[in-house]
Amino acid sequence: MAASDPTGGRPVDPSSGALRPLGLAEARITAGFWADRQRVISEGSLDHARAWMDKVGWTGNFAIGAATGPAEHRGREFADSEVYKLIEAMSWETGRRADPARVREIDELVALIGGAQEADGYLNTAFGRPGQQPRWSDLAWGHELYCAGHLIQAAVANTRVHGPGPLLEIAQRVADHVCATFGKDGSTGICGHPEIEPALVELYRVTGERRYLDQAALFVERRGHQSLPPHQFGAAYSSDDQPVREATVLRGHAVRALYLAAGVVDLAVETGDAELLRAVAAQFDRTWARRTYLTGGMGSRHMDEAFSDDFVLPSDRAYSESCAAVAAVMLAWRLLLATGEARYADVIERILYNVVATAIEDDGRAFFYAHSLHQRTPTRALPDDEEQLGFGGGPRAPWFEVSCCLPNVSRLLASLSTYLAAGDDEGLRIMQYATAAFDTRLADGRRVALEMVTAYPDDGDVTIRVTATDGGAWPITLRIPGWAVGATVTVAGITEPARAGDTFTVRKEFAVGDEIRLHLPLAPRFSTPDPRIDAVRGSVAVERGPIVYCAESPVAEPVGDLDLLRVDPRRAPVDEAGGVAVWAHIAAADDRRWPYGDRDDEADHPPLAPLRLLPYHRWARRGPATMRVWLPTV
Amino acid sequence: MAASDPTGGRPVDPSSGALRPLGLAEARITAGFWADRQRVISEGSLDHARAWMDKVGWTGNFAIGAATGPAEHRGREFADSEVYKLIEAMSWETGRRADPARVREIDELVALIGGAQEADGYLNTAFGRPGQQPRWSDLAWGHELYCAGHLIQAAVANTRVHGPGPLLEIAQRVADHVCATFGKDGSTGICGHPEIEPALVELYRVTGERRYLDQAALFVERRGHQSLPPHQFGAAYSSDDQPVREATVLRGHAVRALYLAAGVVDLAVETGDAELLRAVAAQFDRTWARRTYLTGGMGSRHMDEAFSDDFVLPSDRAYSESCAAVAAVMLAWRLLLATGEARYADVIERILYNVVATAIEDDGRAFFYAHSLHQRTPTRALPDDEEQLGFGGGPRAPWFEVSCCLPNVSRLLASLSTYLAAGDDEGLRIMQYATAAFDTRLADGRRVALEMVTAYPDDGDVTIRVTATDGGAWPITLRIPGWAVGATVTVAGITEPARAGDTFTVRKEFAVGDEIRLHLPLAPRFSTPDPRIDAVRGSVAVERGPIVYCAESPVAEPVGDLDLLRVDPRRAPVDEAGGVAVWAHIAAADDRRWPYGDRDDEADHPPLAPLRLLPYHRWARRGPATMRVWLPTV
């Protein structure tokens, strides 16, 4: 395979599949919900993350230089990777929007990193220097290959935006060193934390060098044979319990499992391995059906940041790490491109609006690591300069000891426009609705341009207007979300029903100015959980369009003890100006010395009254508060 | 205060309080449920634990000798404490039942330990030798004072059974060193893991040396001011977030909080500090009402082995550590002795039958560390020689990397007879029902002896027979458990009702052969949870007498997918030969790609049929199985 177009600006660039992704130059978000979230990253998070990485010494680790002492290293063993993810985010950001100062910043960081690379290509500031552990001496926990993977991903991003440069050279030297060390005749080890796998396939896509693909295949096939040393979380923690072809569900550490699965899709696509693709798709589908929160969040155990058994989805101890959301979007996007099944775009939409949009403070300078769906004691606000020591829970904090999530969400949001649409054999498929502009070429080379205008997700009307065409007939296909019962599509004055959970194709000889008008009904609705999800039995949630709602009780303006909130499920939730309301009351507490027994809860309760809910992604933005997504019924 | 009777054989020996505990020589369990569990320890667990402690090097750590190198230390930093707890268990065991070989074993272990004590009294095999961390350099995590506490407790137990000896000398030298190091003019530090606090008060009780009590007071008052370094679990982890007088509930690491609270009761009793006693009693009462499982288990978070917020009590991720159960019994017993409130004996009974009785395999050679109330994937059996690396969950394993639970349960069971009854101002109070014999003196010095015969908890009839008396009138008071609605007491052919959750006193001039017959109705009953416990909303549990029941689906003899079990709450559970049955079915699965939505679960389900339940403490004894305590209703 030839190297992909280095200026393509595509976060992932498969050589085959049902759909062809667009690049940053072909798809731009121009206003609205996601433009706001991109601005938060652009104007807040990137500088904030950089300042903290300088302050806590993670960038400084590289300044020590290659192979020189002393071995002082600040931060956790994977701190290098955060700098790489930040460079990746900055790279996408500078592809999205010209910013020479940011490009200079990237170049300076790359120069710094390059100075820490050793003569044989090895690059990791936590291992191998005098006084440090030897290279590759702790594959299970050392994160060396993981860090190499993020370095490669940063180089791939930078190359796809700015063309080949010094970062790609550094990354290729690292990758060559990895291939030499872990190739067919080398060590048979794997990394405790997957990431090198998708990175090597992407590096193959950028460079056309087959050895990187072969090395990714070796890493994938070696995993699952319990070759990593036993430890308290078990082999599933690193997906090392079962070969990837035999597993039936994602398990263990959620981010590890999801990064691995993304790499497996990449590998399957590039090697034409349909069986491998089917295996990983089935694992994801089962995970989505049994191990995913209503928000699309994944991971329900704090201890090992892990998936739990099927249907173990506690709201109050949800882990739902921001990084798992990013990784799940990466995986679903790959499955969407490979299979063309629009339901994976439903997956992406749910995760984006309910985890990714929730993660970052409105000024970009604080973030959630984990996403509880039920906050029982009020969150607390942290001072701007206070690092959060625990990385398992809220609140949105300026920084965590482990701060993977901020650069991770940043790299996704900076490149988000490329997830809105994709090309198929003949035309264009619109997968996400936002105010945006597309300018691309069809499979046959004809240029087409569209603009999409909408107030979505506040409003369900979307107008897609053709702004350029080379002529001739071609199809525009729209995703109709699974929840959008009653959707319609209007073309040239004719309105037709569009089936929820399906796609709707308009095929015609489009002229400039032609419009397609999509209407997605956004009446708020109750959702009921599978009865096997013990944690939320007897509760309902409220959704409106793609948005999950919640009840919040800010300390400053309390609505009552949300543990005692009871909602009438027979009265449908209603749209109110600026929100959604349900009929609810705060039940009387029935405190006892022992909370179990022959209980008669027919006490006098206050009458039902409307209770205003707010989008889950807006919670914890009005000061300390309690919150719950699942509302027990009366 | 004078030193207490060294041959008293009382696990705790307060100088004042509403009730006076009996010693091992005064109260013996002679047959039945708990005699069986004591035999399991006596014939299985003690030798099993000793063999593993030799194998994994924990006893060998002491053989290195004081202040000599090399600094090799095997096991975790608190491994010394396990050896001490085992000696404590062996000490009670040799008080319960003469066993010269076991006494020799204790003496040998004591000699070994004595050899590791340093000249100034310091004794810990993990710190202070060449190549090790310096003494007291890591109070938060080092467990040095914790280990000292368990050593003192072992010495107290040994002294109370066998009189003062070398172990008491070793312990006093350690305690004197602690007092010199952490006294008024010394370090103001506290240990991350409480245990030294109750130990020092007990050492004061044994020796009469006031300095130990004063040191305990210093440790208690110093805690709660966030003097331990910040870490990811927060200051609550070590109960260091709030002064003990100001806290309203137990929080953080459950065992830490409970040991501390036990020491606080001891301190309050010995110093006559009624305010302090009230504070800790209120904390326990609130914990019992809001943070305790139906089984009496405590701790609902695996990550930090901790209490969670109020009403966060997930069944499937219950932690409910065996050690927390032992610690809660210690605390409740102290509160019972101090206050005389019989409800604390209800607490003890619930924990004993549903956590302590569940912990140990029938051969004594495997044990639960954590006690799930809902096993979704089958437990697996571990080979006899396989150590369980994770210490967070099941199954009953031969050994864990952290094996605190086995010696802890052993020390409780070996001394369990002393928890059955206590003396009050005039007579005797029977607190637990078991086949047992008592031979003690009333407060005024008169000798009385009783035998108690019962098949409890299988059967609710208990006969108490006077076997010796010095004559004159005196009262026997019986605890009527909170669940025992309809209980009766028959004396001399006259039957009277006895109120559940209260006590019933028979006062007369007892003659040898006089009988009191207590009848406790044991019809199985449904229990419903407080509606704020989200994890089990819409479910019922079945109890019979003090026993919590569960549904088990052994792999070898499956009853179906317990996640789909549905029980009819309108048809009362029934007593069946050898068990309890409810009307239930396994509902049809309604698998979907997305588990939330507008759901209509009125599918065709199989008809209801009787389902046999078994006592929770008997689960996982028939091979790999799934299990659940809380049964969702139809």
Image (spheres, coloured by chain):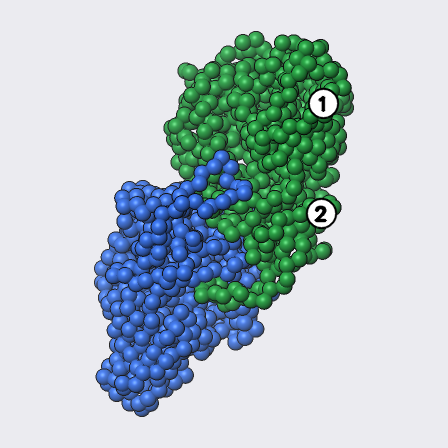
Chain colours: A blue, B green
Query: Residue B78 at what x, y percent from top left?
Result: 56, 32
Chain at tag 1: B
Q: Amino acid at mark 2?
A: Glu
Rendered residue at 64%/28% (across/down): B496
What is the crowding at mark 2: few (fewer than 14 residues within 10 Å), some, or many (at least 20)? few
The answer to which image quadrant residue B183 occupies is top left
Sequence order check, earlier mark of 2 and 1: 1
Along the viewing direction, whichever of A413 and B117 lies nearer the viewer:
A413
Query: Looking at the image, is mark 2 or mark 1 nearer the viewer?
Result: 1
In percent of the image, x 44 and y 49: which residue is there? A316
Q: Amino acid at mark 1?
A: Ala
Q: Secondary structure at mark 1?
A: loop
The secondary structure type at the circle numbered 2 is: strand
Can residue A134 be seen here?
Answer: no
Residue at (69%, 25%) from the top-left corner? B494
Identify the residue at horizontal 58%, vertical 30% (top origin).
B499
x then y, percent, for residue B61: 62, 30
Quarter of the figure with residue B232:
top left
* Mark 2–mark 1 distance (CA, rounded to whole Å): 32 Å
Label 2: chain letter:
B
Which numbered tag is attached to residue B576?
2
Front in this rendered view, residue B485 or B105: B485
Asked if both marks, 2 and 1, belong to the same chain, the answer given is: yes
Q: Are there few (<14), some (14-19), or many (20+) residues within 10 Å of tag 1?
A: few
Q: Position of residue A2 (x, y in %)?
A: 42, 77
Q: Which residue is mark 1?
A: B492
**Depth check, front residue: B257 or A331:** B257
Residue A22 sits in which quadrant? bottom left
Asked if residue A467 lies left or right of residue B24, the reply is left
